[in-house]
Amino acid sequence: MSTANPITFFDLASTVGPFSPLTWRTRYVLNYKNIPYRTEWVGFADVETVLVSNGVPPTSATKPKYTVPAIIDSKVGQEPAIVADSPLIADYLESTYPANSIYPDGSRDLQHKHVNVINANLLRPIVPMVLAVTATVFEARDRDAFVTSRTQDFGAQ
Ligand SMILES: N[C@@H](CCC(=O)N[C@@H](CS)C(=O)NCC(=O)O)C(=O)O
């Protein structure tokens, strides 16, 4: 594997380093597989602008349409692979870089089901409880954008 073309990994900028459980999913896979990457830190206020300008596809038809994590794998002599959405990124990295498998013993489907259960029963229910503390990890401009966005979504400050 060449280190001349590390994968570009889009993660959320903060004052405390990597903090998003969703972007950590991709960071863990990259680290576990020892795949060279460089992090492009994206302010919360700039997620859509930065991803659109890099040709990253939307992850949803509804708001938020553009989300991190996302990766660009620029391979010499080939079209770059541009992937968003943590489960799709995991599948892409596993099929492209099979060493240090993240799906041992045919466990892919079970792991994806597990993640779906965690999302529905743990992550989504605790979001309203962690919104206030999440806002504190951003620089001022991103914090303002986060508070505006989540106030619209959850109807309270
Ligand atoms: N289904 C996506 C969800 C990713 C997601 O929601 N990312 C958040 C950051 S943790 C985001 O980019 N939000 C942008 C916004 O709310 O505008 C995945 O698993 O990658």
Image (spheres, rainbow, N blue to C red):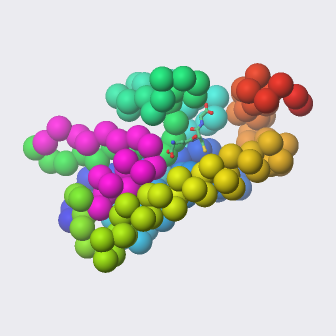
The answer to whether 105 is drawn above or below residue 49 in the figure is below
Could you tell me which quadrant the N terminus lies in? bottom left
Residue 73 in magenta stretch? no
- Dividing the picture into quadrants, the one containing residue 21 is bottom right
Q: Is residue 101 visible?
A: no
Please tell me which residue lies in front, 120 or 140.
120
Q: Residue at x 28, y 47 (%)?
A: 73
Please determine whether, in this image, residue 126 is positioned above or below residue 109.
above
* Location of residue 152 with respect to 41 vertically, above or below: above
Q: Quadrant of ligand 1?
A: top right
Residue 142 shows in the view: yes
User: Looking at the picture, how far across and down is residue 10, in whole percent?
Assistant: 47, 44
From the image, which quarter does the C terminus lie in? top right
- Is residue 92 within the magenta segment? yes
> Hey, which residue is sitting farthest left in the picture?
77
Q: Which residues are magenta?
A: 78-94
Question: What percent of the width, then of the height, locates residue 2?
Answer: 21, 62
